[in-house]
Image (tube, helix red, strand yellow):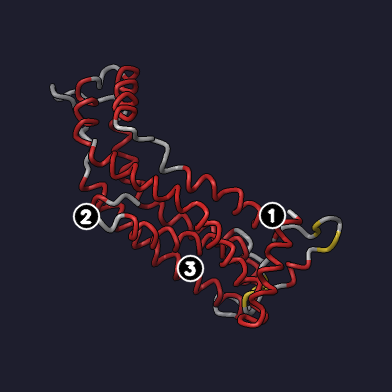
Amino acid sequence: MSVFATLVEQLADLLQPLFAASATAAAIVVFTALVRLAVHPLSRAAARGQKARTRLAPQLAELRTKHGKNPERLQKATMDLYAKEKVSPLSGCLPSLLQLPAFFLMYHLFSSAEIGDEPNGLLGHALFDAPLGDRWHDALADGGVFGGAGLVYVVLFAIVAAVATFNYRRTKQQMSAAPVPAAGAGGEQLPGMGAMGAMTKIMPLLSFATLATVAVVPLAAALYVVTSTTWTAVERVFLYRDVPAPLAQL
């Protein structure tokens, strides 16, 4: 973690002439952008995989109808179809999974009082009036919602809410454009389709889970989340620009 702290400090030194006392916060935003650039090739691969899965949707529906009463055979037939078409069902998860180590490093870095048996000097840095190691409840205790630190969180919550609303609408459009059949050819309920229908209703709302994350983690980690979430929304618009909006999964 000391190497990670050194990297953040060096970025802050480079940005000091432009951002003064908020240079460390700016360094976190730049660091997040660098992480997202590093995983961008995987995001492109995930987009190609999603487009392929959208193209295969009619065939997948046929397999669910044909093998709906035999989950093992359905799974094998689905995996065989993915292999034939060279589509990885896990490709969409990799960009998010590879970002988790960077997020947890940021979280621990600004939650630790010491780094290498020395006081953590990064905890003394702030974004305007909000210390990077504090949380939202600290801002509420020090001036309330519209205090100096509270206003920083108001701006972050507004950004996250705007991005979440955008993602919510696009996810709803995607799911309404690709409904999952709940019954087989004879009208019988297909295994797992009830749970999948419930998930279809819940998934669009997951966009707003980031609001809770920003509220409970240190401000530095919240900056990482807000930057990464905004990047994701913009990146997916770019990656799915050649696909009708209802089919661009978010």
Q: Residues within 10 Å of mark 3 (few under 14, many from 20)?
A: some
Location of mark 2 (residue): 244
Instruction: Residue 168: name its quadrant.
Output: bottom left
Instruction: Identify the residue at image location x=24%, y=26%.
Output: 64
- Above or below, comparing residue 46 to residue 155 in the picture: above
Tell me where residue 181 appears, x and y as whole percent.
20, 33
In the rendered structure, the answer to whether residue 57 lies left or right of residue 204 reads left
Label 1 amino acid? His
- Above or below, comparing residue 78 to residue 28 in the picture: above
In the orientation shown, which residue stands out farthest toward the left? 186
CA gap between label 2 and label 1 equals 41 Å
- Give the SS element for disc 2: loop
Q: In terms of sequence position, does the residue under pointer 2 or pointer 3 come before the other?
A: 3
Return the residue nearer the eye: 209 or 63: 63
Location of mark 1 (residue): 108
In the rendered structure, the answer to whether residue 71 lies left or right of residue 137 reads left
Instruction: Identify the residue at image location x=81%, y=59%.
Output: 114
- Above or below, comparing residue 56 to residue 211 in the picture: above
Instruction: Identify the residue at image location x=42%, y=65%.
Output: 161
Return the residue nearer the eye: 132 or 75: 75
Instruction: Residue 127: name its quadrant.
Output: bottom right
Location of mark 3 (residue): 157
Q: In terms of sequence position, does the residue under pointer 3 or pointer 1 come before the other?
A: 1
